[in-house]
């Protein structure tokens, strides 16, 4: 893989991880168009780590509070004070994030190989990209209704429901950010709260994927040059950070439907080209 290809793939990952257009689908299509066959799993994970850091930077206050609350909660448990979920909303966030991560985690563990095989089918990705467009239109209608919940107002059952939306996004071509945002809106979250939950849910999802593939990553990472790794990582980080802020502005204005149009046009053009 050349540095130019690493830059292109990093930019695609950074932009599409947070825009509701499916990073997995775009990476599969871009790799096919570039002729980069069998993109290293280690390189793909490195791109995801770049976007993970972008989330940490964009939501640094919430991430810091989650980490702080986690260690405070563990300390309270050892001191016999209990979990103290009522004392700090971020302690409740932790519970919700764990519950919301269960559905996708189960699918990833038991059906990971089947899902990985779908990445080689560009035509499957074209279909799922079109489906994502439909999901976003539905989300647009849901988001237009009155919503007044904050993240801490969700119940574990509702968090699990949002997790079911994320579970669908393990398929290449189904947008994780798009489906989880729609999931949050479905359960009455305010738009900015639905977005924050969506992005925070990406943290355990990316870290979980890293742990599941750690053996394969170790076996292939040495085949990558430092320059390729560095360019891919930095590009996905920088582009990802700006992508997060751009998507936040779009959702607040209520115009997610523009991404549906883009996905449908892209799917049609790919059917002609490929």
Image: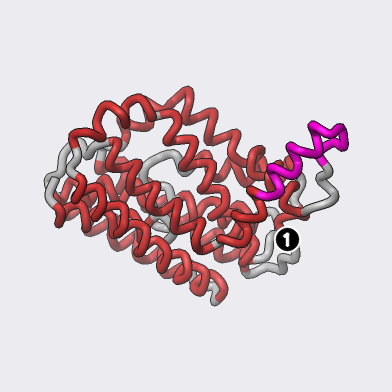
Which residue shows up at 26% across the image and 57% down it?
268
Which residue shows up at 55% across the image and 65% down it?
140
Residue 70, percent from left and from top: 69, 43
Residue 266, percent from left and from top: 28, 59
Q: Which of 97 and 69 lies nearest the eye of the viewer?
A: 69
Quadrant including the N terminus: top left
Q: Which of 215 and 159 lies nearest the eye of the viewer?
A: 215
Label 1 residue SS: loop
Magenta stretch, main secondary structure class: helix
Identify the coloring: secondary structure
Residue range in magenta is 68-83
Q: Which residue bears the numbered disc 1?
A: 150
Quadrant hosting residue 192: bottom right
Residue 115, percent from left and from top: 38, 31
Residue 122, percent from left and from top: 25, 43
Residue 24 belongs to the span the image colors magenta:
no
Which residue shows up at 56% across the image and 61% down it?
59
Residue 74 belongs to the span the image colors magenta:
yes
**Viewed as shown, does residue 148 lie left or right of 112?**
right
Quadrant hosting residue 83: top right
Question: Label 1 neighbourhood size at 10 Å, few (<14), some (14-19), many (20+)?
Answer: some
Q: Which of 43 and 259 lies nearest the eye of the viewer?
A: 43
**Viewed as shown, does residue 15 lie left or right of 254?**
left
Q: Which of 227 and 127 lies nearest the eye of the viewer?
A: 227
């Amino acid at each position: 893989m050349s540095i130019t290809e690493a830059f292109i793939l990093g930019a695609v990952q950074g932009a599409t991880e947070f825009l509701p257009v499916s990073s997995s689908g775009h990476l599969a299509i871009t790799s096919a168009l570039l002729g980069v066959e069998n993109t290293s799993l280690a390189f793909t994970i490195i791109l995801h780590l770049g976007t993970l850091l972008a989330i940490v930077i964009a939501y640094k206050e919430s991430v810091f509070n989650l980490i702080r609350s986690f260690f405070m909660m563990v300390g309270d448990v050892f001191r016999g004070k209990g979990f103290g979920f009522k004392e700090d909303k971020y302690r409740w966030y932790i519970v919700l994030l764990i519950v919301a991560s269960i559905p996708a985690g189960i699918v990833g563990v038991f059906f990971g190989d089947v899902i990985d095989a779908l990445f080689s089918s560009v035509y499957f990705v074209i279909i799922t990209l079109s489906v994502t467009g439909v999901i976003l239109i539905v989300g647009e209608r849901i988001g237009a209704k009155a919503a007044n919940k904050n993240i801490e107002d969700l119940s574990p059952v509702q968090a699990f429901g949002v997790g079911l939306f994320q579970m669908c996004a393990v398929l290449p071509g189904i947008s994780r950010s798009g489906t989880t945002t729609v999931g949050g809106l479905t359960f009455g979250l305010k738009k900015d709260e639905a977005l924050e939950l969506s992005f925070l849910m990406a943290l355990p999802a990316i870290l979980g994927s890293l742990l599941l593939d750690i053996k394969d990553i170790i076996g292939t990472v040495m085949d990558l040059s430092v320059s390729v790794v560095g360019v891919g990582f930095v590009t996905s980080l920088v582009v990802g950070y700006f992508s997060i802020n751009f998507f936040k502005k779009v959702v607040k204005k209520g115009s997610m439907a523009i991404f549906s149009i883009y996905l449908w046009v892209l799917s049609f053009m790919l059917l002609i080209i490929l």
